[in-house]
Image (tube, grey):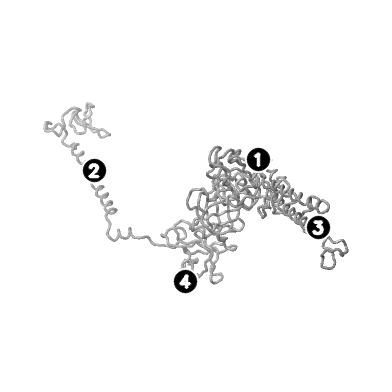
């Protein structure tokens, strides 16, 4: 039983006095009293058998300090093991990792080597209309006086294209370029082309022979000029004086024949009596037969003619010969007279309708270059190759034409790979032509440098008109295997000391073995191979293509070998 004044410790560890006041853990009396450990405390204030609370607190602090120090020592040791390494350990960690084999699977498929380039869809024939007036037609420079068309217009055969210094320029159908003025009396294939073009427009050429510029062709050409509102230029620019003079000469010769015939007692000849078929002695009686070989005398029988009558016969023969010559000259003059077709007034296109793809001239401006550009024929793809690609491509190779804008894919073939470089400007608003005047205007009057080697691709089926002018991708198969073949990445093939080629196959147990092969077509990272010994290499086998760090899938680094080759399946 506690006596008054004794300090009691409650179950929670707090000390209370008998009066119920709580005594602070470090104090010897109620709250606010002086600490029992202080020098001011009187002896006997506490029971001599009680525990000193200050000593207990200091003990706990000591234990906690020891534990914290031990923890710090442990952490320091751990950091030391991580950061502090021996030289051997550093060398091992910084050296190269262990190496493994990087393999790829042998495949069986069709392998094609491809060349990819870009091209522009243009018309098969493109012609620059650049008329050059004939010298001597007038003073001053040629001036554009009419341009009835605009870009995008459709052009028909025989249609007026432009007017230069009052003279027309119109289109005709044909394949031969116009390289000379066609005049009456001319002959040749270009005359036959003109006759065919005029007949197609409804202007008959009469009985003129093919390729002969005769009266029928003159009439047809005159009709074409008048249909577009112009008169043709005369082939002989003398106002018809030569024909008039020739006709007067014929008339005078006819009168002379008539006069001589009347004096000789001969019937008056008709207009055709002096034709070239009439001989010098036509219509005369020859010398009378008799003694003396035709000499006349009083005893001659048969009514021999006098000397005066013989003179009149010679005069009549000469008059008739003069008439024949005059008629021949008249025929020649009339054949040369009539309309002509100047080279500067016509443009030849291979097919119609054509399209105006560009206008460069303006009314009132001088003719210093092409006035407009016409496009005709089916659409083709045109591009220009550099030396490296030119060596790989040739006519007849298969091509895939792809338009990203329209999503169209079409197949075609290389129609042309030029043997010589092109200069000027590439296809666009005014494209280099193919045939007709386009060939002449390809480089003439155009600035620019070396374009490369021109290549033309023709689609197997006509390209839609909407593709005209578009930039497309061309994928040309420059080589392909003959059917399916065994193919491996090019890195799988290596050369031997004797000049052969081998691949290294890896068996199921991981043992590598070298297999001699013959290489074939290569395409963008792959090559076709044929084992020297039949059956030594099959599809699905693994071949070594390099080395990779260990730990990857199947001894690889986790990456599948890739290539950009255009390998296509037979069903494609």
Q: Quick check: 291 left or right of 490? A: right
Mark 3 or 1, nearer chain start: 1
Residue labelled with disc 2 = 64
**Could you give the CA–CA distance between mark 4 and mark 3, rounded to whole angstroms?**
111 Å
- Label 4 neighbour load within 10 Å: few <14, some 14-19, many 20+: few
Q: Which residue is mark 4?
A: 499
Please report contact status of discs 4 and 3: CB closer than 8 Å, yes or no.
Answer: no
Count of labels shown? Answer: 4
Tell me where residue 124 appears, x and y as whole percent: 60, 50
Residue ID at (68%, 41%) = 226
Closest to the camera, between mark 1 and mark 2, is: 1
Q: Earlier in the sequence, mark 4 or mark 3?
A: 3
**Dot 3: within a 10 Å radius of its alpha carbon, few (fewer than 14), some, or many (20 or more) residues?**
few
Residue annotated with mark 1? 230
Query: Is there a contact, CB below 8 Å, between mark 3 and mark 1?
Result: no
- The residue drawn where x is 42% and y is 58% is 551
Residue 538 falls left or right of residue 300: left
- Mark 3 highlights which residue? 309
Gap between marks 2 and 3 measured at Cα: 175 Å
The C terminus, quarter of image: bottom right
């Amino acid at each position: 039983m506690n006596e008054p004044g004794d300090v009691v410790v409650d179950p929670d560890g707090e000390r209370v006095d008998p009066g119920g006041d709580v005594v602070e853990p470090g104090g010897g009396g109620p709250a606010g009293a002086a600490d029992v450990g202080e020098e001011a405390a009187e002896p006997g204030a506490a029971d001599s058998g009680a525990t000193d609370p200050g000593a207990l607190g200091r003990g706990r602090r000591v234990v906690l300090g020891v534990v914290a120090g031990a923890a710090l020592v442990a952490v320091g040791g751990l950091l030391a093991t991580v950061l502090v390494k021996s030289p051997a350990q550093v060398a091992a960690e910084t050296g190269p990792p262990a190496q493994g084999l990087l393999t790829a699977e042998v495949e069986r498929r069709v392998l094609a080597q491809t060349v990819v380039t870009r091209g522009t869809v243009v018309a098969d024939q493109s012609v620059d209309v650049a008329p050059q007036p004939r010298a001597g037609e007038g003073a001053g420079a040629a001036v554009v006086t009419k341009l009835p068309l605009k870009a995008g217009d459709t052009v028909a055969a025989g249609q007026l294209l432009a007017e230069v210094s009052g003279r027309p320029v119109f289109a005709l159908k044909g394949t031969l370029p116009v390289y000379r003025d066609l005049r009456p009396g001319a002959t040749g294939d270009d005359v036959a082309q003109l006759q065919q073009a005029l007949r197609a427009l409804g202007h008959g050429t009469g009985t003129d022979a093919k390729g002969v510029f005769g009266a029928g062709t003159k009439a047809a050409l005159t009709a074409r000029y008048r249909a577009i509102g112009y008169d043709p230029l005369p082939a002989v620019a003398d106002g018809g004086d030569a024909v008039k003079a020739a006709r007067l000469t014929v008339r005078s010769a006819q009168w002379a024949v008539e006069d001589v015939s009347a004096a000789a007692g001969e019937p008056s000849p008709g207009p055709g009596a002096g034709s070239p078929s009439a001989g010098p002695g036509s219509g005369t009686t020859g010398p009378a037969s008799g003694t003396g070989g035709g000499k006349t005398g009083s005893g001659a029988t048969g009514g021999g003619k006098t000397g005066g009558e013989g003179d009149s016969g010679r005069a009549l023969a000469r008059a008739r010969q003069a008439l024949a010559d005059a008629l021949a000259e008249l025929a020649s003059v009339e054949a040369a007279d009539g309309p002509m077709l100047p080279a500067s007034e016509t443009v030849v296109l291979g097919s119609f309708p054509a399209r105006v793809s560009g206008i460069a001239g303006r009314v009132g401006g001088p003719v210093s270059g092409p006035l407009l550009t016409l496009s005709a024929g089916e659409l083709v793809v045109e591009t220009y190759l550099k030396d490296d690609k030119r060596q790989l491509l040739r006519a007849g190779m298969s091509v895939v034409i792809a338009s990203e804008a329209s999503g169209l894919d079409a197949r075609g073939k290389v129609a042309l790979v030029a043997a010589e470089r092109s200069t000027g400007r590439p296809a666009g608003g005014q494209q280099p032509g193919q045939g007709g005047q386009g060939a002449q205007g390809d480089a003439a009057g155009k600035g620019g440098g070396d374009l490369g080697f021109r290549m033309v691709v023709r689609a197997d089926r006509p390209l839609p008109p909407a593709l005209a002018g578009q930039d497309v991708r061309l994928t040309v198969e420059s080589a392909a295997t003959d059917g399916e073949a065994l193919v491996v990445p090019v890195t799988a093939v290596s050369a031997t000391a004797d000049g052969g080629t081998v691949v290294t196959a890896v068996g199921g147990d991981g043992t590598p073995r070298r297999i001699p092969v013959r290489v074939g077509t290569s395409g963008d990272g792959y090559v076709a191979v044929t084992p020297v010994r039949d059956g030594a290499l099959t599809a699905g086998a693994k071949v070594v293509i390099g080395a990779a760090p260990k730990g990857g899938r199947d001894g690889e680094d986790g990456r599948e070998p890739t290539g950009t080759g255009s390998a296509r399946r037979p069903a494609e």
